Image (cartoon, grey):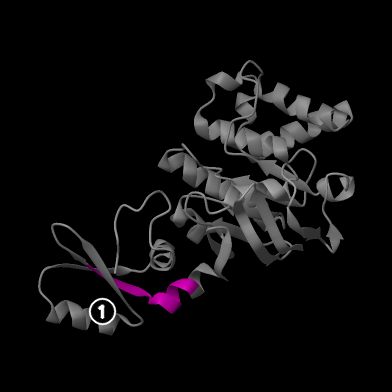
Amino acid sequence: MIELKNLTKKFDNFTAVDHLNLTIETGEFFGLLGPNGAGKTTTISMLSTVLLPTEGEILIDGNALSRKASAQKRKLSVVTQEYSMRQDMTVEEVMEYQGRLYFMPRKEIRQKTEELLEFAGLLQFRKRTVRYLSGGMKRKLMICRSLMIEPEILLLDEPTAGMDALARRQMWNLLRKLNNENLTIILTTHFIDEAQALCDRVALISDGKLDVIDTPKNLIQKLGAFAVDKTSEETLQTRYFHTKEEAIQVLSEEEGDLALRNTTLEDVFIDRVGRSLDAPKMRRK
């Protein structure tokens, strides 16, 4: 179990994370959502001990996490937004290098490399140089590399950034398989459909503060499971309803360009935060 207690990070006069309190259960697939600058990556950086909290603490199974707490740090592995592999290495050389960093026996490195690459569908590319991998394959390799030490917790910061739709779905399948093996996963993403599809619970963060935390299903149902969009030349207005009958009644009574659809987690986000994850492109009422 991971506990964030009054976790705070300040940069001079700017507070990036403001007294964040969260509990993430063992084996949970947990999502951190928020607009740009909300504090998601800063939170991941503190979990990985790249940054130290200004106030508060992080507990893993009741023990405080710090840069000196090697036993706690060993439970964590992180996959960052940026590609952080040498482009002139082959896939298996990347894996071997990771194993050597942790003083793993050569036989174990070879065994783990084969198991992980096969698990991720990369075994046939083991001799390929990193620079010649697709973006999706590089992301998969970064996850394989992070799993060499058999962590209990995997931190993923925008793991599908830059992927096409097919590669994203392949990554989703890989992450589901990992989570089904009781690996705790903490995910930040700009793709709301990703969080809705993968996460057991999500936390919406705005201006470094926790806004709400719940399952995607519960958040959607609280807003209203059905949405009616009314489109005009300048605006898109959306109304939410708890029953399809209520939504259909509005469709039959109002005129204009109307459409009925299921409410999504993105609707919840926009309703609570007031803008999309990328930019304030369109207001919805």
**Could you tell me how many numbered marks the image carries?**
1
Closer to us: 272 or 97: 272
Q: Mark 1 points at which residue?
A: 247
The residue most toward the left is: 255
Q: Which amino acid does label 1 sit on?
A: Ala
Left or right, 35 with reference to 285: right
Q: Where is residue 43 in the image (x, y as percent from the top left)?
A: 65, 52
At label 1, counting other C-alpha atoms closer than 10 Å, the crowd grade (few under 14, some 14-19, many 20 or more) is many
Rendered position, 67 above or below 31: above
Q: Which quadrant does the C terminus fall into?
A: bottom left
The residue most toward the top is: 88
The secondary element bearing badge 1 is classed as helix
Q: Position of residue 230 (x, y in %)?
A: 19, 67
Closer to us: 173 or 146: 146
Residue found at x 60% / y 25%: 125
Q: Is residue 144 visible?
A: yes
Q: In which quarter of the image is residue 209?
A: bottom right
Left or right, 127 with reference to 216: right
Residue found at x 88% / y 45%: 68
Which span is picked out in magenta?
A: 219-229
Residue found at x 38% / y 65%: 267
Residue 238 part of the magenta segment: no
Q: Where is residue 79 in the image (x, y as percent from the top left)?
A: 65, 40
Q: Is residue 202 visible?
A: no
Q: Which quadrant does the N terminus fall into?
A: bottom right
Residue 224 part of the magenta segment: yes
